[in-house]
Each structure stands twice: as C-alpha cells, then as structure tokens.
Image (cartoon, rainbow, N blue to C red):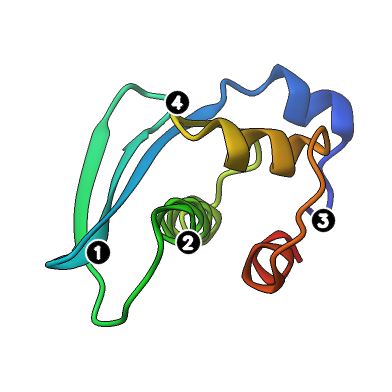
Amino acid sequence: MTGTTQEEVSKEKPWLLHVDGSSTTQGSGAGVVITTPQGHNMEFAIKFDFKASNNEAEYEALVLGMRIVQDAGALHLLAYSDSQLIVKQVCGKYEAKEKSMVQYLQ
C-alpha cells in the first residue's frame, strides 16, 4: 500500500468475497465468489486433491479468495462465510485450538 493513506483506503469501495467450503466422504472443495468494486463477479469452484475437514475447506476457500483479490490489487475487502467458527476465529472472538486452525489464522 505504498503511497496510499488509511483514509484513502477507507473511502475506496470494497471488494466483496463470499466463500463456502465443503467436505464429504467423496472429497472436499470450495466455492468462491468475488465482486469487484465495479460490480463484476468472478466465480470459482475448486475441488481439493487432499483430504480436508469442513472447517479446513472453509479456511482454504477464504485464503484462496484473499490471495486472488490481493493479486488483483484490492486494498479494501469485506469477506463473508457461513461458518460461524471461522468467522469468530478470524475476528478474534473464538480461540483456535486445533493445530490446523491455528496455522490457517497465521
């Protein structure tokens, strides 16, 4: 964010990130929907080639979406997830206790 003040970032219209991870006996994956400040949508469906719990799939979706918007140059992001656990851990309201959850938060 070189040359960008906090005030300029807060005035910028945010990018929107909606994520949903899923894990079943047949595999795991994630859905990611990104909306640019101009209102353009990008949708991604990802099938993981590794075993993941539902919570891990949720975190994978969040991390992937954050990387995409960062690579696109986003400075202001609002992220949404239907996982109460992930949201509360990211916001600092819940403590991550499982090793994998702690690693995702880092």
Residue mark closest to the camera, 4 vs 2: 2
Q: How far apart in space, not on screen, are marks 1 and 3 (Cα)?
A: 38 Å
Residue 12 in the image, given as x and y percentages of width and height = 64, 23
Q: Which residue is mark 4?
A: 37
Vertical placement of residue 83 versus 23, above or below: above
Residue mark closest to the camera, 2 vs 3: 2
At label 3, the amino acid type is Thr
Label 1 crowd (10 A; few <14 / some 14-19 / many >=20): many
Q: Could you say whether the residue bearing mark 3 is in a helix, strand or loop? A: loop
Please say if the residues under marks 4 and 2 sit with CB atoms less than 8 Å apart.
Answer: no
Q: How far apart in space, not on screen, are marks 2 and 1 (Cα)?
A: 9 Å
> N-terminal of the two: label 2 or label 1?
1
At label 2, the amino acid type is Glu
> N-terminal of the two: label 1 or label 3?
3
The label number, if any, that marks residue 2 in the structure image: 3
At label 4, the amino acid type is Pro
Residue mark closest to the camera, 4 vs 3: 4
Label 2 crowd (10 A; few <14 / some 14-19 / many >=20): many
> N-terminal of the two: label 4 or label 3?
3
Q: Kindly identify the residue that appears in the image at 37 percent across and 24 percent down.
A: 38
Q: Which residue is mark 2?
A: 56
Q: Kindly identify the residue that appears in the image at 70 percent across and 34 percent down.
A: 88
Q: Kindly identify the residue that appears in the image at 69 percent across and 65 percent down.
A: 98
Label 4 crowd (10 A; few <14 / some 14-19 / many >=20): some
Q: How far apart in space, not on screen, are marks 4 and 3 (Cα)?
A: 20 Å
Q: How far apart in space, not on screen, are marks 1 and 4 (Cα)?
A: 30 Å
Q: Could you say whether the residue bearing mark 1 is in a helix, strand or loop? A: strand
